[in-house]
Amino acid sequence: MIKREIKEKIIERTLGLSALLTVLTTIGIIWVLFSESLSFFKNVSLFDFLTDTEWTPLFTNKRYGILPLLSGTLLTTFIAIMIALPLGLTIAIYLSEYSSKKFRSYIKPMLEVLAAVPTVVYGFFALTVVTPFLKQIFPEVSSFNALSAGIVMGIMIIPMISSLSEDALFAVPKSLREGSYGLGATRFQTSFKVLVPAASSGIIVSIILAISRAIGETMIVAIAAGQQPNLTFNPLETIETITAYIVQVSLGDVPHGSLEYQTIFAAGLSLFVFTFMLNNLSFFIRSKYQEKYE
Amino acid sequence: MSRIGMNRFNDKAFQVFGIFATFLGIILLAIFIGSILMDGLARIDGQFLSSLPSRKAERAGILTAWTGSLWIFALTALLSIPIGVSAGVYLEEYAAKNWFSNLLEINISNLAGVPSVIYGILGLEIFVRTLKFGGSVLAGASTLSLLILPIIIVATREAIKAVPSSLREASYGMGASKWQTTWMQVLPASAGGIATGIILALSRAIGETAPLIVIGALAYVPFVAKSPMDEFTVLPLQIFNWTSRPDHAFVINAAAGIIILLGITFLLNGIAVYLRHRWQKKVNW
């Protein structure tokens, strides 16, 4: 009997260690980003980093302002959300309020395929299909541009918004729908005047997570948006995102320990801070929301 | 038009727009896959699958890339499945509901939202430099394992949650210990859901590019990896390398590589959807 208890304890501890690994991963990420960034910020002042409008660490005239990379990141993210939000929300409402159950069960796995396609494939799509297409509409568009990458990224995150928003709509109590229909409202009125407001926190969560995903997306922008830090909000120009910069440095042979090498940690830290805040914001809203409904 | 007529019109119009929106993404993807098939299908032959990378597009192949992907797949599975399922079991069956398990939960959903390129930076410092794995298969698989752990853990927890407590109580009633109950009742009952999550997670790992670039995996590796400590390349990396070259012949190669990669991705996702479907049908507590 004692032997069995010892065995049980050992098993529990082993399982617990696996769970602990996730905490170690987080600590590892924070430690790595902060410790290397610290050496970076010994050479570059935080003020310059946040306010300088040039990012040229790989050139002779070195400037270390994150703003051009940040504007590139925000620009592609904005375009992606402008594509994914109307489409994703429409799909969510259509599937939860209009379509038949059977149609839904067939279409949902197909939508999930959009999210399963490797991002390098989407990058290829943006560069070889979308950009040539854009060139026909806007002849002045660069071969690498924010618009093409943003559009394709938007297509990729459609299922993220649609499936999370649909869950939120689904969770709205049936009585609200029935009340609205009882007053003679159409499905359209019920959806937009009753259900979307009632499910708003869940929908907001889906948007926040989609933004976070778009900010961290790497391959699409590295392939299609370019590698030219550019403080602009013109979607037709070549830009560079934070993630694309990290890839650019990793592909080159920057010596380990140099200031150029440390820039990827400072860039990574900025990226991490953004996504971390967005993820926790979504977590906060979700826990509030659950309180409200249960 | 009367107000009621207007409302009905809006309702119908939105319905049409809904169908349009639902199919837009899927149709765009279909067009894209069609154009890739036209570009690349003719390029896929025995020579393409069995050749090393080359500076000449016609002689280049994906031998190192697909064997590398196979290595990464196997080693990532080996590392991530036991750890991920264990962690999921611990959180769902063992951990007391207190501030610590709460913290673990928040932490895991946070990790799931960390951009993959950040995992690359972590892998570069921890596996490549500190543990001195170098740009090896082992470093790549370790990095990707950390990346997909949250997916496996969440899937495991969801699957275990669906197992009714009556099953556990019956097992305890027969005198089984906690671990016996978990191992012989709970895990078999949730195996379908767990397997679905694992396959989706591995499909994600197979398609990842950015973290492997950051840890220093190269597109040009002139030999097939023979041990976990060898340098390697993977299909997505080879595709990326070919995509970024100006010579159109390489773009054809990239398209051919994409066909293979998408084939693998869709196959894995198909298996996952099938498993989930069967599991939902069979288990009706």
Image (cartoon, coloured by chain):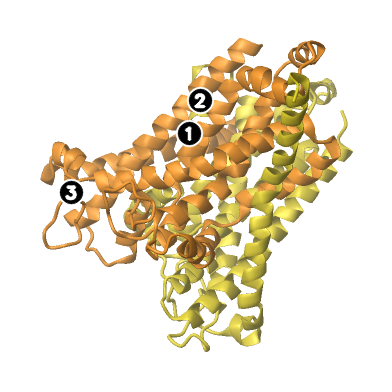
Marking on residue B110: 1
Give the camera-side residue of B49 and A13: B49
Residue A54 horizontal/vertical position (percent): 19, 50
Residue at horizontal 51 percent and vertical 76 percent from the top: B251
Q: Specify the quadrant that holds the N terminus of chain A.
A: top right
Label 1 is placed on what type of residue? Asn
Alpha-carbon distance for marks 3 and 1?
29 Å
Name the residue that disc number 2 marks. Answer: A283
Measure the alpha-carbon separation of dots 3 and 2.
33 Å
Q: Residue A51, how many percent across, how many down?
A: 18, 39
Q: Is residue B28 visible?
A: yes
Q: Name the spot of residue A214 as percent of width and height, x first.
A: 47, 44
Three-letter amino acid code at disc 2? Phe
What kind of residue is marked 3? Tyr
Disc 1 residue crowd, few under 14, some 14–19, many 20+, Cα 10 Å: many
Q: Secondary structure at mark 2?
A: helix
- Which of the numbered marks, if any, corresponds to residue A64? 3
**Is A133 displayed left or right of B45 in the figure?**
left
User: Which element carries disc 1, helix, strand or loop?
Assistant: helix
As rendered, which of A289 and B273 lies closer to the eye?
A289
Q: Residues within 10 Å of mark 2 (few under 14, many from 20)?
A: some
Q: Colour of chain B?
A: yellow
B253 relative to A113 in the view: left or right: left
Indicate the colour of chain A: orange
